[in-house]
Image (cartoon, rainbow, N blue to C red):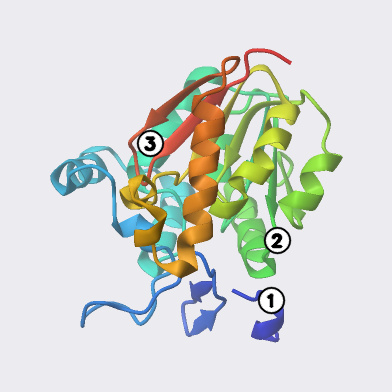
């Protein structure tokens, strides 16, 4: 496999060697001596609430049993970008409560969050997940097989910008978006289009460790586009007079939107 042909930008740690695929928006060199050479998702290690509370939420809440717990542990050990444990517990609770029939996910990674949500689908329910990275796609496919979810999950390899417009309108009870942060505002109208009335959109990692509150001039140039686009998303969603929204300070911040009208 030609690594350079897989993706232009992510850092993925394999069991036997480092497979370098750069995700430009989260890539950085180490600041501390003992730190890994590169960090896949810097913001995973910069939560927006006090560290003592984060540690409590991550340790006090029970882990996930079986294969799901193994997938989470595998990702955390290798710095693969999956939702942190406190966010995963929230999504688990939310999905168990609403028991959706159709779920759409944008950003599969290795399939942890999709597997988590798919457990709570209605008997005739289905989950569709989109990812453009071939290596992530292959890993997720393996994990869905281990979870026994092959018949309940559809994996689409491609860019969400191209895939979303092809999906049916008003088809999903829940949309979970955890992909390129600078693209959130671009994907937002399509996410709302495919949501049914009363459906919920969950957008992960919207605070960027609180840096979205800072002046753009103080933001490193390499992430200014993310900063600008996330602020645009916040302005759009929080000032919308029609749809209901809320912010949840878990992980690096969650923005939730309930579709109130067509």
- Residue marked by disc 2: 132
Of callouts 1 and 3, the N-terminal one: 1
- At 63% from the left and 13% from the top, the residue drawn is 260
Numbered disc 1: secondary structure: helix
The image quadrant of residue 165 is top right
Relative to 239, residue 12 above or below: below
Query: Percent x, y for residue 43?
Result: 37, 57
- Residue marked by disc 3: 89
Of callouts 2 and 1, the N-terminal one: 1
Query: Percent x, y for residue 236?
Result: 56, 32
Query: Percent x, y for residue 120?
Result: 56, 29
- At 26% from the left and 77% from the top, the residue drawn is 31
Q: CA distance from mark 1 to mark 3?
A: 32 Å
The tally of labels here is 3
Relative to 19, residue 76 above or below: above
- Residue marked by disc 1: 6
Q: CA distance from mark 2 to mark 3?
A: 26 Å
- Neighbor class of circle 2 (other Cα within 10 Å; few <14, some 14-19, many 20+) is some
């Amino acid at each position: 496999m030609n690594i350079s042909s897989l993706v232009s930008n992510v850092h993925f740690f394999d069991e036997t060697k480092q497979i370098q695929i750069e995700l430009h928006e989260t890539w950085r060199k180490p600041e501390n001596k003992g730190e890994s050479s590169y960090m896949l998702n810097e913001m995973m290690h910069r939560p927006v609430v006090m560290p003592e509370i984060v540690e409590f939420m991550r340790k006090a809440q029970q882990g996930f049993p079986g294969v799901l717990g193994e997938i989470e542990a595998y990702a955390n050990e290798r710095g693969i970008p999956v939702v942190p444990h406190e966010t995963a517990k929230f999504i688990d609770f939310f999905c168990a409560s609403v028991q959706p029939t159709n779920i759409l996910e944008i950003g599969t990674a290795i399939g942890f969050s999709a597997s988590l949500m798919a457990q709570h689908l209605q008997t005739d329910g289905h989950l569709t997940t989109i990812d453009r990275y071939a290596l992530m796609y292959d890993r997720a496919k393996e994990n869905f097989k281990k979870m026994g979810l092959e018949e309940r999950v559809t994996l689409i390899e491609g860019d969400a910008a191209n895939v979303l417009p092809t999906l049916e309108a008003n088809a999903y009870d829940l949309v979970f978006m955890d992909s390129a942060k600078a693209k959130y505002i671009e994907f937002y109208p399509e996410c709302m289009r495919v949501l049914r009335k009363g459906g919920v959109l969950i957008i992960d990692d919207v605070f960027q460790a609180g840096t979205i509150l800072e002046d753009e001039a103080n933001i490193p140039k390499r992430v200014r586009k993310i900063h600008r686009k996330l602020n645009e998303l916040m302005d759009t969603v929080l000032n919308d007079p029609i749809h209901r929204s809320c912010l949840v300070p878990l992980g690096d911040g969650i923005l939730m939107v309930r579709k109130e009208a067509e």
